[in-house]
Amino acid sequence: MVMKHDIPRQQRNDAGRQARSGEDESLSCRTIWQSQCCTLNGCASLIEALPSEVYFTSSATEAINWAIRSSVCFRGKRNKVVVSSIEHKAVLNTIKDLANTEGIVVEQVRPRKGGIVSVEDLVRHVDDNTFMVCLMAVNNVLGTIQPIEEVANALLERDVFYLVDAVQTVGKIPFSVRSSKCSFAAFSAHKFHGPKGAGALFISSETRRRPFITGGGQESGMRSGTQDVAGIVGMAEAMGIAVDELDRVVPKMRELRNYMASSVRKLGGIINGDMSSSIPNMVNISFPKIKGEVLANALSDAGVCVATSSACSARSESSQKILEDAGILPEIASGAIRISMSRFTTLEEIQSFIEILSNVVAVLQI
């Protein structure tokens, strides 16, 4: 977000002179300011937020850091954070850092079998010493949808900050900050075909917050530094398309995912996680006695890109822990790969993948 006062007076004057003299106003600061204001309003409306509640960042990781570190400043004498054990490393490692530097106590709640966190299990850990609860909307390894709205309702009478990692929602499932009743929600543009290096943080108007970066006063003084205008505009455009296309593409992606899952089972594969409550574009699979990294490398050699961990993680250990926390046997978890699709994926591509997978598995099982 760029407020008019963020633009130096001289630049505003120059922009005005350019417009009056017939120069290309598309390059002027005035046009940039107007574009970002429209972008801010657009992003906010898509998640049912107020424009004043949305701040642009460089990534969801930055947004999550901002939310958690800001909350620490308003915790008073409380020092406990309750999180699910299947959160993204952006959450877990930030809290781990604060445990070392600020004496924060962390309680992790494991999901039940299938990879979905129980509301009862999570809320049971929230007490008078708790100042924050973190729960991702969708797990990034299994694709399972978490009960963020039910948790929000259970926390209504609690004076706690509530952070929702909403990175995997846009373009896959409906998401509203109003229905989720969260204090914070984090987003990342590249997860819905926007540019890398652009993200956003929703902060409820009722939530106390502090600036993450001080300086020139951009983002209403909350995140100073020159904004990436191209990234922000690209993010807003991509988010708009993803939300507009949701009703059309979700049935298609779900049909393709179900076809893929059925084909994997016929090859002797195992589907990890509760597919009945997961986003429509992701499936996590294993083949007994085949290591995930071996399978992923073999598929890569055949021209197919899959993952043994989230795209943001350089190692697969964290993904295996998530699978084991979800009740998946270690020998199955160690063989897991994650397959992701998009709204552009076709049936022909899935059929080609299954054929390649069949050949690769046959060789590896010899």
Image (cartoon, rainbow, N blue to C red):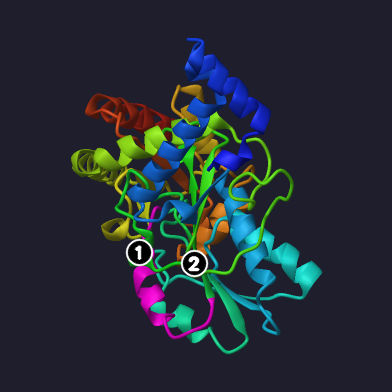
Q: Residue 107 occupies which quadrant of the picture?
A: bottom right
Total marks shown come to: 2
Task: Return the x and y of residue 311 as percentages of the image width and height.
Answer: 54, 41
- 197 versus 90 height, above or below: above
Q: Inspect this view and state whether residue 147 appears.
A: no
Residue at horizontal 59 percent and vertical 28 percent from the top = 12
Residue tagged 2: 183
User: Where is 228 relative to 150, above or below?
Assistant: above
Label 1 secondary element? helix
Considering every residue shown, the one lying at the far bottom of the view is 128
Quote the CA–CA distance across marks 2 and 1: 10 Å
Where residue 160 appears, as percent x and y from the top left, is 54, 78
Please give the name of the residue rendered at 48% of the width and 56% of the height, measured from the top-left corner: 53
Residue 158 place in picture, x, y as percent: 48, 84
Left-right relation of 215 to 245: right
Residue 27 coordinates in the image, percent (x, y): 53, 18
**Residue of label 1:** 178
